[in-house]
Image (cartoon, coloured by chain):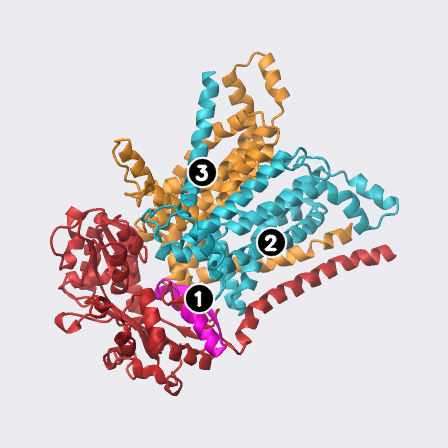
Amino acid sequence: MNRKKLLGTPYYIWSAMFIIIPLCMVFYYGLTDKNGAFTLENITAMALAEHAKALWLALGLSLISTLICLLLAYPLALILTGLKVNQHSFIVLIFILPMWMNFLLRTLAWQTILEKTGVLNSLLSFLHLPALNIINTPYAIIVGMVYNFLPFMVLPIYNSLAKIDQNLVHAARDLGADGMQVFLKITLPLTLPGIISGITMVFIPALTTFVISKLLGGSKVLLIGNVVEEEFTQAGNWHLGSGLSIVLMLFIIVNMVVSTIFDKDGEGSVL
Amino acid sequence: MKRNKTKSMIPSILFMLCVVFSLGLTGCGSSSGDEKWEVVVYNWGEYLDPDTLDLFEEETGIHVIYDEFDTNEAMFPKVEAGAASYDVICPSDYMIQKMIDHDLLAEIDFENIPNIKNIGQQYLEQSREFDPENKYSVPYCFGTVGILYNKSMVEGPVDSWSILWDETYADNILMQDSVRDAFMTALKLNGCSMNTLDEGELEAAKNSLIDQKPLVQAYVIDQVRDKMIGGEAAIGVIYSGEAIYTQRENPDLEYVIPKEGTNVWIDSWVIPKNAPNKENAEAFINFMCREDIALKNFEYITYSTPNIAAQELIEDEEIKNSDIAFPDLTQYDNLETFHYLGAEGDELYNNLWKEVKSQ
Amino acid sequence: MIKNTAKKLYLSLILIFLYAPILVLILYSFNASRTRAKWGGFTFKWYGKLFKNQEILGALFNTLFIALVSSVTAAVIGTIACIAIMNLKKRPRAVILGITNIPMLNADIVTGISLMLLFISMGIKFGLGTILLSHITFCIPYVILSVMPRMKQLNPHIYEAALDLGAGPVYGFFKVVFPEIFPGVLSGFLMAFTMSLDDFIITHFTKGAGIDTLSTKIYTEVKKGIKPEMYALSTLIFLTVLILLLLVNQQPGGNKSPSGKNISEKGV
């Protein structure tokens, strides 16, 4: 048995080299200043008005997007499980398929659709409806977030729904439960791991995105992801960028803890 | 017994494989630097005719590795960190000054660049503002920053930066999404120097930019080109080189240099100190200065060339005499070139810009 | 009846939402005008030009090469690691799985930055190597997390029985264990491949001079206007994948894994 454990060595070394050490580097940069002296300034910088605003905005937009994803995905997953398609993978692939079109191009396509002279507005004016001006506003960013991350919500919920033993539902019915009761007492609790996992998979990338806000927000809406990205690529202040990343990681850790509490066996994973 | 031996071998073999593999990978990454016959070029996006690279490879046998950046600020940390060693870079004026200041540039051996004779004296003179002895840089493109407007959407002649603050054009204005260019418009509007470090002036400029923000449709860099052609916006802040291209695609567009003055910029070739192939880099710069190559590049990117010999060769009279491509700069007041403002100056501008963007 | 129509309507609306941008991109690949802003008539010329565009084809090759190498490497390292993790005691196993989760749950931007800082501090030149190392790193968790559930279902006695009957450990593994966990390995591999293919942010921070994947190429092009050849290429990729999927789903049993179980039993 001992020998088997050794099989893990390549992976342990790999994760130490490329997961643990890099994170330590972020902490090192985040906790030092330009001269290499210890400081907490880069962390507390998050409280500065311009950073705090970007963080709040990012939190707000990602929470709204996560909620919309959840509200869209749950009924969708219910409908999908009800479909009489014996090849579940086909359904799953419908949601994976768009990912084969490049992420940036997909987001750029939304810019084309939502623009003032874009596809949607041409359609609206053809129908004599008033034009919709949401490009370069937070609304457009929400559309982009929901669009890009919806599959990450649908798949885990769908997976946990598909796993429910239909006998449970039938038993509940036989015992006189109505549709609503079945949903609240059986379906919902059993799909909770899927929901939690979906929330994690949507919330974190939405919170930290910088591409969607850049392409659909016209750089007018500054999210915390943009601040961090610009500190690294434009302003060249890696210490500040790392410090702000550490704060971001706090949210990620909270999220991880919550998801492990609700999802002990990894049942609701996307995979 | 035998079984145990093989068992214990597996992990160690795997580990070895793992190490060899990762070393091999990093090996292919770094081996490229040791090659003799190549030159690593770091240039602005779409800033030369790709055909000229093929011609260069054919004539010299030097293989070109080409990489692009989108702002001076994005280029700098990459070169400073030394993670990727480039041989030739094409930064703008103030950034060249900053790189000289940080001791990142190598002196160019002009013996290897006889074609420097094609570059107009006035441009070398202008270069002295950031490269006082013309030791480090060879001008590649120059131009102004101005306002591009759509005649079908904007009333009357435009001649001032103030139109960017005109509420009639709310949601129809495109601003530059880079610190110095954005502050330049506000500082010029307020009648200040665009190289100011005066906190009061900068605070005022910041407030102007914040006032302007609700009117701005988007902060963009090069996307201004596509958006103006498509009629997405009525007014945009743009580099003169892009103006000629956009006019070709959409004749309604007009370019002006505002009366309050603007930025006259030069982008020049420089060689970083850690360049592994300095001689190839000089060969490359020399090649780029050849009149036929400069002409080819000018026709492709439409940014004004300081190459006098190439200017002579332009066939299209309209372009040759174009005020946009080759403006008579003496008729404008308050033209300036960006200066490097020091680490503190940079930080000051960056912080103010972040305040504007987070509003 | 009404309920059914409502369901279908909802499903179609979501599908329109998901596929509208893709339709737009496909449409643009037939646009005769160079800029995104104008419709210049219908043309096939970009498809012809695509095959002469060395830059885009090079980026495509890099993308596929990186995705393939990193997902295969991740599948090998991840599967082997799973065997070891299964044999760990509860606490170390939780720690290892926690670490495994980091690249998946952490923000891409933080992962990208942390790797960039590592490579710089180690003095590694940025290039294909750094991209591959980063991609393998974020691909492994997808493999481990999809192989683990299969491993858990595995009856350990079968493997032991094989050993008792004289099979060597490697032979025993490939004859008995591997067929059982293969669906998990395959779906982990596919997920890793897709993720690597679609990644922009981590590549953005770890790429070096002169090497571009489709994502980073597109990111530079976004600013100057996407070259229509890029739309043509995306359309071709999309259609290829679509046709492959339809073929796989048409074939009866085409979706079955060697062990006779449906791949998607655990989802993809």
For mark 2, give the secondary structure: helix
C2, above or below B284, in the image: above
Q: Residue B272: give its label.
A: none
Q: Are the residues flagged by discs 3 and 1 from a single subunit?
A: no
Residue C153 lies, in percent from the top left, at 71, 37
Dot 3 and dot 1 residues touching (CB under 8 Å): no
Residue C199 lies, in percent from the top left, at 50, 52
Using residue B65 as the reference point, say whether residue B23 is left or right of it: right
* Segment tinted magenta in the rendering: B51-77
Q: Supply the letter of whichever chain is orange.
A: A
Dot 1 and dot 2 residues touching (CB under 8 Å): no
Q: Supply the letter of whichever chain is red.
A: B
Q: CA distance from mark 1 to mark 2?
A: 24 Å
Q: Which residue is mark 1?
A: B67
Q: Which residue is mark 3?
A: C19
C250, above or below C205, in the image: above
Residue B62 belongs to the span the image colors magenta? yes
